[in-house]
Image (cartoon, rainbow, N blue to C red):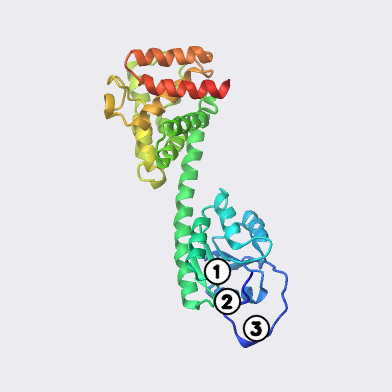
Amino acid sequence: MRSNIPLLASPEEAATGAVVFCSNPPPASNRGRILLVDDDERNLRLLEAHLKPEGYELMKACDGIEALEVAQQTPPDLILLDAMMPRMTGFDACRRLKQESSTGLIPIILVTSLSGRDHKLRGIEAGADDFLTKPIDRTQLLARAKALLRMKRSTDALEDAETVILMLAKAVESRDPSTGGHVERVARYASQLGKALNLPESQIDGLRRAGFVHDIGKIATPDAVLLKPGKLTPEERAIMERHVEVGYDMLRTVRTFRESLPAVRFHHERLDGSGYPLKLRGDQIPLVAQIMGIVDVFDAVSTDRIYRPAMSLNESFAVLHDEAKRGLHDPKLIAVFERLIRDERA
């Protein structure tokens, strides 16, 4: 049952029984956009009284369902979410918001009159970033809001950097019309193989990201070399091979690509030492780079290219098996990957 304890109760507010339907004010500041969610208008007004003088842009929602709609339409930088509301509790709304890709990184403070350990655990399980207990202390409210808004700005900066890099990777791919969709397919193949090998989630995510940016260094490769239909000269081959180091240098300072760097830099290394850029051998080559090397070759031979038509599925895996016999790849990794692809296309 919902508690009627106000956020910062005063005799005047407690005597007011009217509940006004929530409305969202126009944008007021660039300090941060905060969504306030409570089914009691008195509580919303009290929160607003503390936050508005600080220059925040405030939006309001009357329950969990409306909060989901508002957050999807106009994503806030922070959500203050009452835990106990009709139609949808704050716990359920928090869980839904954290599960959606468009709202999952928005910090959420659960506001509640429930101070028990079980309710806090329930909030943690739902994905809440912080908790405030009614009646709310103004100083505590402002301190926690500022801290979470700083965290959100840092997250947004990382997302912006990643978005620019991914757009650049797509622009690089678009230079060669025969490779359309290559990075998406390689990202999917690599993450699928990583999952089948029970790799840690961080490495699987790193493989997915690496799939999109593994050839980003080709931005420095001249069209005359990148698009040449015939065999490359030794000088042209050296120019082409530099793309892995260029890509590595572009990505190594971006934190979100940290797990992707080994796959980007070493996906052209081969177990027998014949690859590049460092001619690594055997276990010197990180597993994620071996995975990327296998799926990159598979996609290259199984799709149309300037210099030849696509090979059939059987022909494509024949190429990989032949390369494994020559000591380029781990045949066990190829066997797992082949089962995945054949099951997928059965």
- Amino acid on which the number 3 mark rests in the picture: Ala
Real-space CA distance between mark 3 and mark 1, rounded to the nearest whole angstrom: 18 Å
- The amino acid at mark 1 is Val
Q: Are marks 1 and 2 in contact (CB under 8 Å)?
A: yes
Question: In which image quadrant can residue 325 be found?
Answer: top left
Is 222 situated left or right of 271 in this image?
Answer: right
Residue under label 1, please give it: 111
Spot occupied by residue 139 in the image (x, y as percentages of width and height): 47, 77
Q: Residue at x 41, y 28 (%)?
A: 292
- Mark seen at residue 7: 2
**Label 2: element kind:** loop
**Could one spot residue 279 in this view of the protein?**
no
Look at the numbered disc 1 and give the secondary structure of its residue: strand
Q: Which residue is mark 3?
A: 14
Q: Residue at x 34, y 28 (%)?
A: 242
Q: CA distance from mark 1 to mark 2?
A: 9 Å
Residue 101: % across, % down: 56, 48
Tell whether 17 sits left or right of 246. right
Quadrant in which the C terminus is drawn: top right
Question: In the rendered image of this protein, does residue 219 appear above or below residue 8?
Answer: above
Dot placed on the residue nearer the N-terminal end, 3 or 1:
3
Residue at 65% over, 55% down? 73
Label 1 crowd bin: few (<14), some (14–19), many (20+), radius 10 Å:
many
